[in-house]
Amino acid sequence: MGRVAGKVAIVTGGGSGIGRACAETLAREGAKVVVTDIATDDGQATVDAIRSNGGTADFLTQDVASEPRWEEVIAETRATYGGLHVLVNNAGIGIGGPVWEFSLEDWKKQTAVNLDGVFLGTKHAIPAMRDSGGGSIIIMSSLAGMQGSPGLAGYCATKGGVRLFAKACAVECARAGFKVRVNSVHPGIIETPIWTKLGGNAFGSNRPNAIDPTVLAQASAPLGHSGKPQDIANGVLFLASDESDYMTGGELVIDGGIFAG
């Protein structure tokens, strides 16, 4: 307990899946957590769960692709809690489909959330963290940001983009002397709602509308099973804490051994 005591954290996409696990874990370990999500009921449910367990949390509705809203979220967080030390850039969407069937509309929609949202959050969090004495920005990439996946070219493009974005930001912040660390996390096959949404047309219009992550992981992960959101939250907690004080520009791969071969 208390691994992030005294820290103020923002978790985007905190209403479900990995985001909710991250928010609850950070709160359990002593952080004051601002949960944001475009789904108001889901985000508030996370906050209610945190508070019922004795934690401190607030909810703000947020479209991460909106720069004015990012400015408001950062300002409200600082006004309420006096600073900002941790940002978990977790909000994301997955739209599958072969490149030759993929629409420009879906490409832009996915990029707006997965890439633009991460850029905007990082851009506005850095000055706030600098003024708070330093901090940790954690960018949720994916195993799909490290290797190609058929039917997920657009998703891979966004997740690969934020992977290198994290490295560039890490070097910039370090050389500027801001004491702001930036790292990326790369989940493998985790049991979250995104698989149902990704499955739709990921492998062509005649395939099923969902992917069962447990079955997929049994076939592809050396450990033989899928991961849980808590597996990712444990890694995020490490990156948010002072235990990772010498880690920046790094990649935390949590995938059951898939990337290792």
Image: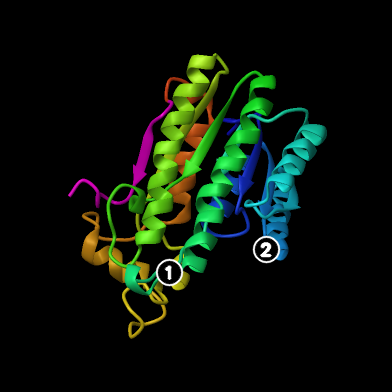
Residue at screen point 54% across, 62% down: 109
Q: Is residue 258 above or below residue 93?
A: above
Type of amino acid under label 1: Leu
Q: Nearer the viewer, residue 225 or 126?
A: 126
Name the disc covering residue 198, or none: 1
Q: Is residue 53 above or below residue 224?
A: above
78 to the left or right of 9:
right
Residue 74, magenta (yes or no)? no
Name the disc covering residue 39, or none: 2
Q: Nearer the viewer, residue 227 or 156?
A: 156
Magenta stretch in the rendered image? 248-261
Residue at screen point 28% across, 65% down: 150
Query: Residue pushed farthest bottom?
Result: 206
Name the disc covering residue 244, or none: none
Q: Distance from label 1 to label 2 (Cα)?
A: 18 Å
Residue at screen point 33% across, 85% down: 206
69 to the left or right of 156:
right
